Each structure stands twice: as structure tokens, then as C-alpha cells.
Amino acid sequence: MAAYQLCRAKAAEHPFYIESIDANIYTIEELCFYFQENISLLDESILNTKLCDWLAEELGMSKLAFQIKEKLPEAESIAELVLPVFREIAYLNAAEYRSIQEQITRLEVQPEDIRRKIKADSLVEYGMFSGAITIYRQILGQKSQGKLGLQFYATVLNNMAGAYGRMFLFEEAANCLWQSYELVRSNAVYRSYLALLPLYLNEEDCKKRLEELRVPKEQWEKIEAEKRQVTEKLDQKATFENATQETLLKFLNEEKRKYHKSRR
């Protein structure tokens, strides 16, 4: 990043809202930083007339706004829309500028489904799990196994399982892992699937499913042990949170008592 970094431009009274990651942008520097760090997320939901209007009305950058708006209908690459923003305030040094150009080129030559997956993976990193899952589903709904291969779609399912898991939707996560396993028969995926079963099935249904899969008894016992460890950790966390809440409540009550005493 160029030595420019200190904010010299005005801050917007009304921010530019980026819905995909639930973030507000107030300055041209923040916009540049977002562009630089999130090439895979740059699309028509951001690079549009709303952005141009915001640049002109909130930041007073009418010339830049006009330049971008003029290119919007016919731009063949997002570089035509993004690079002028960097140039406007000399945000990047020469090496960084070339790097951004290369990143955009590498991304844009990829097949559409790969670009979608990269975007969804980025949303997961931001904690935007629902948005990521929507894109993963789009990829799977239009998949052509001869196009990118079974391994690619299995990876998409694995990543979607991870997104569901972080939302505590363990059954949906397990379903994704099972579909992935059916595609590529990965032992690692199979073990992950088995580990999820006790997190959403009751003991009887879990045992029934393990019997259907002919899981060896020693593996059953290992799964049960892992379940107990998870349960213990959750119980410990709940105990800690309850204790913390009680401590906070006592503190607030004591402060309230002191306040009323001082008022008297």
C-alpha cells in the first residue's frame, strides 16, 4: 500500500452500504481498501450507478463518478471501473497497482462456477454464511460434472457444510457432507459426516444410522467419546456465561445501590 494512507479526503455524511458483507463505507480510502482486499466480491451489486452517485454527492468526486458511470454499460473488465478509483488518490504504489491488475485478470479468466465459489468462500470468511450458501446452491444447481469434475463439486459441498455448521445447522451440514462423500468417497469427509450425527440425532436414531452404515463398534465408541467431549465443553461454556451474567448483575446492582446512597 502506498505511503498515501493518511485520510485526506472528506468523509461522507451518508455511507455507501455494501450489503454482501453488511458494511458501511465513509471515505474514498475505505473504498480503496475494500476494493484491494476483496477483488472476488466486486460485481454489479457494488460497481453501479449508486456508487457513482455516492462518490459525486457525498465525496464531491463528480469527475471520478462521471468517468465510472460512463464505462458501466460497456466495461469488459471490472478493472476499467476499479482502477480509476485507486488512481484518483494514488492509493497504490506501482507494484501494488500491477498486482491488482494481475489478480483481476487471473480471476476473470476462470470459469464462472470457480469465480462463484471464490466469492462464496470470501463471504464465509466475513461470517456471511447465508449469502455464501445461496451461491453454493447456485453452483450445485447448475453443475455439469464433465465441466469441472466431481472433486470441484464435492469441495463446494464441503464448504457449504462448513457454512451450515457455523450456523449450528448440523443436519444440513451432514446432508452436504453425505452428498460430497457420494461423489468422491473421501474417508476424511466420511469421518466428518459420522462426527456430526450425534449433534442432531437422538441416541436411538444415531445408533440406527450407524448400523445402516455398518460402522465398526470401536468407531461408534470413538464417536460417542467425541460427543461427550463436545457436550462437556458446551456445558462448561454455558456455566461460564451464566456465572458471568450473575457477576455482571451483582456489579450493576451494587453500583445502583451506591448511586442511590450518594443521591441521598
Image: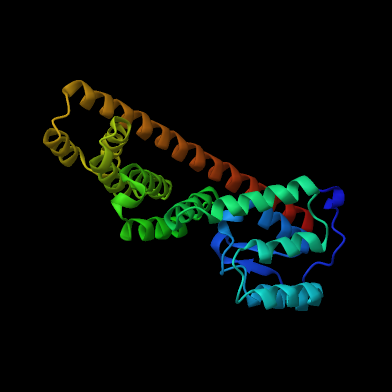
State the quadrant of the C terminus. Answer: bottom right
Please identify the quarter of the rendering in which residue 49 is found: bottom right
Image spot of residue 219 (x, y percent): 23, 24
Does the image show residue 146?
A: yes
**Residue visible at 55% across and 41% down?**
244
- Is residue 163 found left or right of 215 in the rendered image? right
Image spot of residue 123 (x, y percent): 52, 53
What colour scheme does the image use? rainbow
145 or 233, nearer to the observer: 145
Does the image show residue 13?
A: no
Number of marks? 0
**Residue visible at 75% across and 64% down?**
84
**Residue visible at 62% across and 50% down?**
103
18 or 93, nearer to the observer: 93
**Residue visible at 66% across and 74% down?**
71
221 or 255, nearer to the observer: 221
- Is residue 218 found left or right of 236 in the rendered image? left
Tell me: residue 69, above or below residue 199.
below
Image spot of residue 175 (x, y percent): 27, 48
Image spot of residue 108 (x, y percent): 54, 56
- Is residue 127 found left or right of 99 in the rendered image? left
- Is residue 114 found left or right of 107 in the rendered image? left
